[in-house]
Image (cartoon, rainbow, N blue to C red):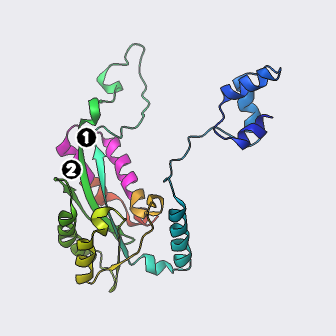
Amino acid sequence: MITRTVSKDPRTTRGDLVNDLQRAGTKVTKATISNTLRRQGLKSCSARRIPLLKPVHVQARLKFAREHLDDPEEDWENVISSDETKIELFGKNLTRRVWRRKNAELHPKNTIPTVKHGGGNIMLWGCFSAKGPGRLIRVKERMNGAMYREILSDNLLPSARALKMKRGWVFQHDNDPKHTARATKEWLRKKHFKVLEWPSQSPDLYPIENLWRELKVCVAQRQPQHITALEEICMEDWAKIPATMKSA
C-alpha cells in the first residue's frame, strides 16, 4: 500500500501515510515508512522547479529539439549566448558547517552575516561561447530595448573578436521582450547577425543559466560585504570559470 500510494502521488508525506494506515487499522512509525520506501528504491528529494509549460511551449520545444538533434558539435561551438541576471548581496549564502565550542555560536567566526531584504543587488549582462567567456558588465540602470542594443553594440562584437569566433557565428538570446522587440530585430538584421531561433519558456535549455548558477555559488562562497565588492568578485570569478565549464 505504501509504495502504491507514493507511486500514484509522489507528494504524499510520511505523515499522510501514517494517518492512512492508522485509519486502516495498522500502526506504523515514520521511520518504518522511510525504511520501507528506501528498500523499494524510493527516497525523499526536493522537487525540481521547472518552467510551467503550455501545450504550445511543449510543441515548440519538441520542434526545436528535433531540428537540432543531429547538429554536429562544431555548430554549437560557433554560438555565442548572452543573458542578464540579478545577483543579490547576501542573497545566495550557502549553508556552512563550523567546528565550535559550546556557547560559541555567536562568535563572528561561527556566523554568516545576513541583512534584511537581501542587502541590495546588481544586474549583470554577460556572454560566452564554448571557447570561453566574453564580456561581463554591470547594468546600472533599468534596461530597456535601446540600452540592450547599445550593450550588444559595445560588448557582443568585441567579445566575438576576442573569442576568435569563426565567420558566420550565431547569436543566441532568449525571448525577453527587449530581445524580441521589432527595433532589436531590425538592429540585428542590419548588423547581419545570424540569430538562433529559441523556444519560449525554455530556461532549462539555455546554457548560460548553468554559468549564472556557477557564478552565484562562487560569489556566495566569498561573501562580499558591500555592493562594490560584489561587483568586483563577480568580474573576478567570471574570468576564472574555464571554457569547459561553459560548454557543459
Residue 224 in percent (x, y) is at 25, 40
The reply to whether the magenta stretch includes residue 230 is yes
Residue 213 in percent (x, y) is at 39, 52
Discs 2, 1 touching: Cβ within 8 Å = yes
Q: Is residue 222 above or below residue 184?
A: above
Please give the label number shown on residue 232: 2
Element under disc 1:
loop
Quick one: which residue is furthest to the bottom in this view? 167
Element under disc 2:
helix
Q: Is residue 20 above or below residue 177?
A: above
Task: Magenta stretch: give its range.
Answer: 211-234
* Residue at the image position 31 percent from the left and 68 percent from the top: 180
Query: Which of 215 and 122 lies nearest the eye of the viewer?
Result: 122
Quick one: which residue is furthest to the right in this view? 25
Between the residue at mark 2 and the residue at mark 1, the CA separation in whole angstroms equals 9 Å
Please give the label number shown on residue 224: 1
Quarter holding residue 2: top right
Q: Is residue 81 above or below residue 240?
A: below
